[in-house]
Image (spheres, rainbow, N blue to C red):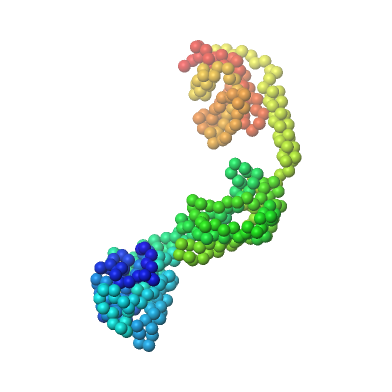
Amino acid sequence: MSKINLETFDLTQLPIAEDDNFEFKSSDTSHNELKKKLSCAVSGFANSGGGCFVGGVDGNGNADKGLLLKIGRQDLRDWVDQIISQVEPVPKYDLKLIQDPSGRGTIQTDSAVLLVVIHESYFAPHMAPDNHYYIRAGAHTVQAKHFIVDAIWAKRHFSKPRLTHLFRLKPEKEQAIQLGIIALTEAPAVDVKITISPPPQMMKSYEKLFPLKLSLIDRHNPFFFDVATFFKAEEQFGKDIRLEVEYYDLSANRYIYETPIEVIGSLPPVTIRNDNPEKMVQTLEKIEKTLSGLRVSRESVVKPSLLLPKQSNSVFSSIEKLIPELLADMKNDLSEYPFIREFVILSNKWVYNSDPNNMVLSYYFEDHSYLRNKLRILENYGLIYEITYNDVARFVISEELAAYLTSDSQLE
């Protein structure tokens, strides 16, 4: 509901009937019944976005004598406060006693119209003294069903502002590390104050700027600031650093987020290491030497010294009968890539990075059962030979086999 200004509110501003935001109770209501109705209404309004309980008026919002200013020996205000205090948790509320009817009915001299304004609550659900939860359903206060209560409990978690922190590499400038304060829920945090003690080394000269003051942090407006450089991050940021964030919600409830923070372990391992650039260069040089050695080994392997005998057509006919599917795949590949002679055998679950300057064909265990045994047949006839130099088995197709597979005389 829209906020009511109690200082200027009078009976002329009441609606002519109860609705979602207003509940009326007559002056003729007994004290026990009024106590029960008030406690249920407080629970219902607090669980439904706020509203007003008006005592001492008829069903049209006109004063019908008003409520006595004394309930026994107790002041009406104290009596109402005591009733509301039994609602758990107690919601935020305001009271006003109106003794001027402003043309809306009559109020006796020792009485007043009671106005109880229940604010929208971020701590719902609120339970009445009878151990039940209530909500507003149109112009009525009704007991909430279990699934409604569960939904209110879930909303309670997300309706409060919740802030936390994280470290990240600064976008577009990854040599800097930033500390960010971000929102975990949709509710905005206002009047935010950020304190870091002691401040990181690179912020010593800005110590007077703390606490940092921000008007708002929410899902769309996080706050990030530089706290260290990538190089020697742990040394620059320091140890035993504590972060404190004080903030408020829209109902002026105060929150504190306080935690020790450290930059080590807060970023991916690769990005937070303090590697000396000289060591990185040495490592790269070692990798280059290793790769060069592999290239030399490969060149020595792919140049076989043996001279393979030329096979007869009867041999190819026999092989066709033994491994027709594999030969068919090899024929298709060579028809598309007639100059390629090398191939590897893999599982389709592997990730294989081939040399872009030396294209090879690939055959998969999942496509050809007993693939290694079938290749052994070709090896026995000298039609392929193995040149493996790493963890992946690699072979070369002989020119005799390549000529047979690409010739028109191959058996179908």
Q: Is residue 205 visible?
A: yes
Q: How many numbered discs, if any?
A: 0
Give residue 121's quadrant in the image.
bottom left
Residue 19, image x, y percentages: 28, 66
Relative horizontal placement of residue 75, taking residue 163 as reference (left or right): left
Residue 182, image x, y percentages: 53, 54
Give residue 67's quadrant in the image.
bottom left
Who's the residue at 52% across and 60% down the image? 191
Relative horizontal placement of residue 240, taking residue 7 as reference (left or right): right
Who's the residue at 58% across and 29% down the image? 345
* Vertical relation: 228 (above or below) 140: above
Residue 27, image x, y percentages: 28, 79
Q: Which residue is the extreme one toward the bottom?
A: 73
* Vertical relation: 123 (above or below) 270: below
Name the residue nearer the viewer: 375 or 183.
Answer: 183
Relative horizontal placement of residue 187, taking residue 29 as reference (left or right): right
Q: Quadrant of the N terminus?
A: bottom left
Relative horizontal placement of residue 286, taking residue 269 as reference (left or right): right
Q: Is residue 131 visible?
A: no
* Vertical relation: 78 (above or below) 272: below
Who's the residue at 69% across and 31% down the image? 291
Who's the residue at 59% across and 24% down the image? 359
Residue 147, image x, y percentages: 36, 62
Give residue 69's quadrant in the image.
bottom left
Name the residue nearer the viewer: 282 or 114.
Answer: 114
